[in-house]
Image: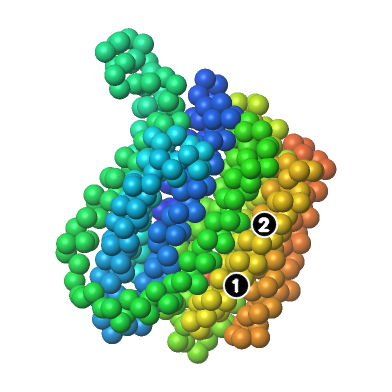
Amino acid sequence: MSKYQALFKQTFIYGLATVLPRMFSFLLVPLYTSNGMLTNAEYGSVTILFSYIIFFNVVLSYGMETAFFRFFHQHNEPNDVAKTSLYSLLFSSFGFLFIVVLAKSWLAKSIGISEDLFTYAIWILFLDALVVIPFAQLRAEKRPVFYAIIKITNVGLMLLLNVFFLMVLPKLFDKNPLLQSIYFPDAKVNYVFVSNLLASAFTFLVFIPKYWLAKGNFDWSLWKKMIRYGFPILLAGIAFAINEHLDKILLEKLHVPMAQIGSYSACYKIGVFMVLYRTAFTLGIEPFFFSQAKEKDAPQTYANVTKYFVIFGSIITYVVILFSDILKPFLIRNESYWDAMTVVPIIVIANFFLGIYTNLSVWYKVVDKTWIGAVISLIGALCTLLINWWTIPVLGYVGSALATIGAYGSMLLLSYVWGQKKYPIPYDWKTMGMYLMLAFSGSLVYFYGYRENYWIGFGILLVLLLFTFYQQKAFLQKIIPTWKK
């Protein structure tokens, strides 16, 4: 089996591990936005708190996951790499828990949330940090099926718990007043985070044996190298969190009504389908890129993978935008949220830019120049801050969407220009440019010019598919047998 066939098989399985949990998670959107569930303002507050959680998820993993992949494939004792990274996160997570619990009242007040919600967030962060390396180890050991099972079970459990707390328990409460001690009708937002916490606890319990059965030794010298390697990844991760999630926080700080933030956050979720593709591909290619680093034809391999990412991503970009209005009644049940649908094409294209950037960023990872990634990401974060600051007072949440596409577009261009000077990769920009032009022009013309005119919409899709089949027929014939083996 060729390396490309192996990559596509692994990406397909990781895709299931990503798509199915995300789909389960995405089912929470119609649950939260149904009439009688969370109001627009409550959904906005949920989104903002999860944005804070994502920021601290990055801090608590401090680049150790990527450092694990880097040293696992090159160190003489892979078990030492696993144990060193595993126990590093264990000790730091307990340190975080101790400090934050002592100061939780002051911190909760500073952020502007209740102490109960803050407590749930602390424990979610703690438990999620402890499973970072166990999940990474499954990927490094090429065990995508088990990885997929745990990921799917985690999100499936969270979905079921949300349904129980928000739909089943209220009905039981009506019939049984004895439940008054455990059910509080005005605490729907709290139940959202309780569900997340219980699902995180389940995942941690599954991985507990990884800690007491870990082989190898904790290597201080190795740990210092991993910290040095991972620190720029930490900075890049913080910058990524700024690019991806700071907009919701800034919208609140710049006095955009919470109900509008809720509408924006709900419609933003429609872009999740491009996120699924981007994430699944990333999970498959990151270990693959490192494993190919020593091969003579590595640059050409990287170029080919990026080209196919752009080809398939261009089609997915258009399809998501085409079907967005068909999907919205099923995914966002309350029409009061639909005012923000205008941002969907911007968010989808922005996420596609991020996927392309992820492919282009391989060069600084394989040459151990991760600080370059931090610099690029920080420049992207600066773009996010400045564009949001300038545009939110004028355009509201549309300004936040434009800031997202501006940040990822600048990162993409900067990584390419810088990378070609340090680690030249022969990207086929002629082919990729054609697909980007067709997908973007088709998407924007359809959505902003002929929206919901599906004769025109499906006509554009047919042209795009026929063009792809004609241009990539030989490649498609090579990968299609992959699924039959």
Residue 391 appears in the rendering: yes
Name the residue rendered at 63%, 40% in the picture: 252
Amino acid at the residue labelled 2: Thr
Q: Residues within 10 Å of mark 1 (few under 14, many from 20)?
A: some
**Residue 96 drawn at (x, y percent):** 35, 55
**Residue 14 drawn at (x, y percent):** 42, 58
Provide the residue designation for mark 2. Answer: 384
Q: Secondary structure at mark 2?
A: helix
Name the residue rendered at 56%, 26% in the picture: 39
Q: Secondary structure at mark 1?
A: helix
Amino acid at the residue labelled 1: Val
Q: CA distance from mark 2 to mark 1?
A: 14 Å
**Residue 25 drawn at (x, y percent):** 46, 41
The answer to whether 201 is drawn above or below residue 358 in the figure is above
Residue 455 appears in the rendering: no
Residue at the extreme right of the image, as rendered: 449
Residue at the extreme bottom of the image, as rendered: 296
Name the residue rendered at 48%, 66% in the picture: 234
Q: Residues within 10 Å of mark 2 (few under 14, many from 20)?
A: many
Image quarter for residue 104?
A: top left
Q: Is residue 49 left or right of residue 87?
A: right
Instruction: Tell me the quarter of the image containing the N terminus.
Output: bottom left
Q: Which mark is residue 375?
A: 1
